[in-house]
Image: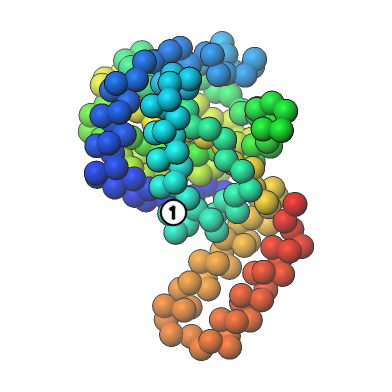
Amino acid sequence: MSVILQQVLVAEDLVRVREELAGISWVSGKRTAGAAARDVKENLQADGADPKTKALERFVVDALKRHPLFEIAARPARVTRLLFSRYEPGMTYGAHTDDALMGGGEDKLRTDLAFTIFLADRASYEGGELVIESSLGDQNVGLDAGDAILYPAGSIHHVAPVTQGARLAAVGWIQSFVPDTAQRETLFDLSVARSRLAQAGVGRDELLLMDKSISNLLRMWAR
């Protein structure tokens, strides 16, 4: 299941992120690629050792966590550090699947979900779509600046070549309390339905029954 999160970052947030990224050094993205993906990854990444990068990561992750759909779509237990990526003309990230485990020692986590937050205005570059393969065909994703997509980290996906301009994005991974995709989707659907019923004026007793069911399913499925 893929979920679009609109306006994770609003206009003033994007101005801040772009201005701060302009003052940070960029390094080869191959440094953070897994062994299987290193040969097909050709992009730039903001220097993760720079304190300014770390502060910007916290700012963006905090915005992501505040989004009203993030909690119910991801059921996040842990989130990795962000990678700020830049694709210039000719750069691409070939077909790959993300490492199942990332980090080291106590920081190691299971990657149930990946996310990409688009940072550049869509009209400022050409190409660079995130392409996610599925049994229903390829999903080509090119979102407005500030929007994000959550998608299964175990899917085969790639970033199409950029042909003009520069594609900027923030990417990261999530370990979910509910690792099973179907179970997570069921909880998401029930939570969305509950919200819509509340907006429609359904009585409190009926909503309370839905709350009970969602909570009990979460108790059964959470790890």
Residue 36 position within the rendered picture, expressed as x and y whole percent measured from the top left: 64, 17
Q: Residue at x 34, y 49 (%)?
A: 7
- Closer-to-camera residue (68/103): 103
Q: Is residue 199 above or below residue 42?
A: below
Q: Is residue 96 above or below residue 178?
A: above
Residue 11 lies left or right of residue 63; in this view the side is left
**The disc labelled 1 sits on which kind of residue?**
Arg
Q: How many marks?
A: 1
**Rendering quarter of residue 39:** top right
Colour option used = rainbow
- Closer-to-camera residue (119/144): 119
Residue 34 position within the rendered picture, expressed as x and y whole percent measured from the top left: 62, 19
Q: Which residue is mark 1?
A: 66
Residue 138 position within the rendered picture, expressed as x and y whole percent measured from the top left: 50, 36
Q: Is residue 49 visible?
A: yes
Residue 134 position within the rendered picture, expressed as x and y whole percent measured from the top left: 57, 39
Residue 47 lies left or right of residue 189; in this view the side is left
Q: Residues within 10 Å of mark 1 (few under 14, many from 20)?
A: few
Q: Is residue 178 above or below residue 134?
A: below
Q: Is residue 223 above or below residue 61?
A: below
